[in-house]
Image: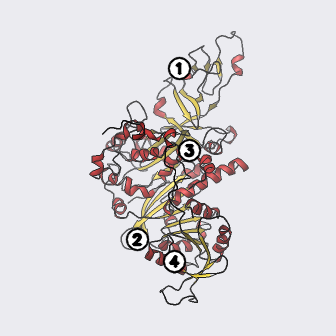
Amino acid sequence: MRPILLNSCAEATTAAETRFRIDVPITDGRAARIVALDEGAAVVVRRVAEQHWSGARFFTGVDRTPQLNDNRESTDVVLRATDGSQSRLDEQLAGADLVVMIATADDGAKAASAIGDACTLRGIMTAGLILGERREVGGAVSALRPHARVLMVTKDEQDVSEVLTALRA
Amino acid sequence: MLKQEINELLTQTGPATPMGALFRQYWIPALLAEELSEDDCPQVRVKILSERCIAFRDSDGRYGLIDEFCAHRGVSLWFGRNEQSGLRCAYHGWKYDVTGQCIEVPSEPENSNFCAKVRLTSYPLVKVGAILWTYMGDPEKRPALPEFEFVHVPPEQTYTSKRWQESNWLQAFEGGIDSSHVSFLHSGGLRNDPLFKGAKGNEYNLADLKPFFEVAEADGGLFVAARRDAEDGSYYWRITPWVMPSFTLVPPRGDHPIHGHFWVPIDDRNCWVYTFDYHPVRALTAEEVQAMKDGHGVHSRNIPGTYRPQENKDNDYLMDREAQKRDEAFSGIRGIAMQDGSLQESMGPIVDRTRERLVSADVGIIKARHKLRKAAIALRDEGMTPPGVDPAHHRVRSAAIVLPKDDSFIELSREAVAASPGVRQTSV
């Protein structure tokens, strides 16, 4: 059937027709967890965490010490928040739909693996942002690649905020 | 999601805008050489970066891109006569050369030098490959000519077309670095298109609808890579280079030519999509060129005598619901070019990015926007030359490559993504 009204055909992409698009909020922001995998990344995450976010939670470190582990689940990964408090990874992943791992070096490989596995199990999207010159962060790239569905290598720290803002974190 | 002011900064390219200033740092396509095919041929109206110009080729083969309107009474020089080394206004006979210099005002006395004081704005117009390129920035900062490989291979190895897209340049360009839509929107093309089908890489594409993505900085812009599982502990990588401001290459498939695009703002609601195919080491076959002219691959089939696609918003892009049901065309629209163009135009002339819901797979787009914004601001505030101006940045290629899982795509594919004359493209 051929369209007979202007707004029932492709012509409805004019600026005038754009005014009639439904203007109701679609979803809340993402439930994002941002995790620094090393000390260099922790410095960046502390800075970024001070900005205004819609619910993102920031963690400056990952410990494998089982101090909070009461064996309710097999994971023994503990996340350190920017205020120094600690919580278990599985608790933080409950309700999350995105985990962004930040790295500046390759010493977070084990943490990335634990986080990646836990996210895969729960169907949570993972992203990795590696800060540094490309030729100097090859180890970090290799460490994160298997565990981050999206990986960006950048020497621009601002990209962390840019990505989180774009994702409504 | 972008704030409104950032969306405006990125999408407005007229004079005295930051992004307009950024575009004016580069040589950009102004028209196809075929549009001015011989000396003294009819002049062509060219609106570019929101400036109305007229392009012509004079009796001596020189190209000019000058202000469209006569300095006298503001008449369009499109009605003028291209004759005897100049463009003469049809109203009172004022005549201009390719630099915009007025060389004759018939109403003035024979020995008057009045015309020497009249000069229209003009921009250089230079033929490189099948494209006439212009540079609209400060003449003092005019960079060396473009060195993109597709305009430097022998003519029989390259083919360029263009089409009008009724949307802002940015949403069109963003499609060029958005690898995740290919397995959906263009799935029919991967199976059937004569310029796509038959490659081993297509099997990886169609088998894995959830690729992993990596984004890495390049000197001139970015490399956006999508990886999918291949055999024996290896990944199939498709690497898309972006050279600022708006040049992108599609990763190749098999021995098919390499495709690519250059998006050029006409104004803030329209852009030209320059589309090319080239093969680094062999002539394009007659069948390949015919397929491109017929609108296959990434080209469009245009209304004869125009650069407007036959599938356009006036006819609902010739939507074919039966082809959609048969899975020949995922969206029901024929051809890869207009599958993209139709959806990008459906967003509206300038998409409202305050309302979008990006996901992490869009990180290439997020990074590209950030790079554009940073470059525009650095140019405005510090006069910093942006990436992509240096012709060395143009010498890149797309690549499709299978690599061991543990290896870095960017390190191992360094040679594959460098344009090397006479060297076959890296493709699967």
Q: Residue at x 48, y 34 (%)?
A: B33
- Residue at horizontal 47 percent and vertical 42 percent from the top: B274
Residue type for callout 1: Phe
- Identify the chain of the residue marked 1, using the numbered disc in the image: B
Quadrant showing the N terminus of chain B = bottom right
Mark 4 vs mark 3, CA separation in Å: 46 Å
The residue under label 4 is A115
- The mark found on residue B79 in the picture is 1
Q: CA distance from mark 1 to mark 4?
A: 68 Å
Quadrant of the image occupied by residue B221: bottom right
The three-letter amino acid code for the residue at tag 4 is Ile
Q: Does label 1 lie on the same chain as label 2?
A: yes
> Chain letter of disc 2?
B
Spot occupied by residue B129 in the image (x, y as percentages of width and height): 49, 40
Residue found at x 65% / y 45%: B18
Q: Nearer the viewer, residue B131 or B351?
A: B351
Quadrant of the image containing the C terminus of chain B:
bottom left
Q: Kindly check if marks 2 and 1 are in contact, taking CB atoms under 8 A apart as contact.
A: no
Q: Looking at numbered disc 3 in the image, what kind of residue is underneath it?
A: Pro
Q: Are marks 4 and 3 on the same chain?
A: no
Could you tell me if the residues under marks 3 and 2 are in contact, i.e. CB atoms within 8 Å?
no
- Element marked by disc 2: strand
Foreground of the two, B126 or B276: B276
Residue B243's x, y, as percent?
55, 51
Q: Which residue is mark 2?
A: B234
Q: CA distance from mark 3 to mark 1?
A: 32 Å
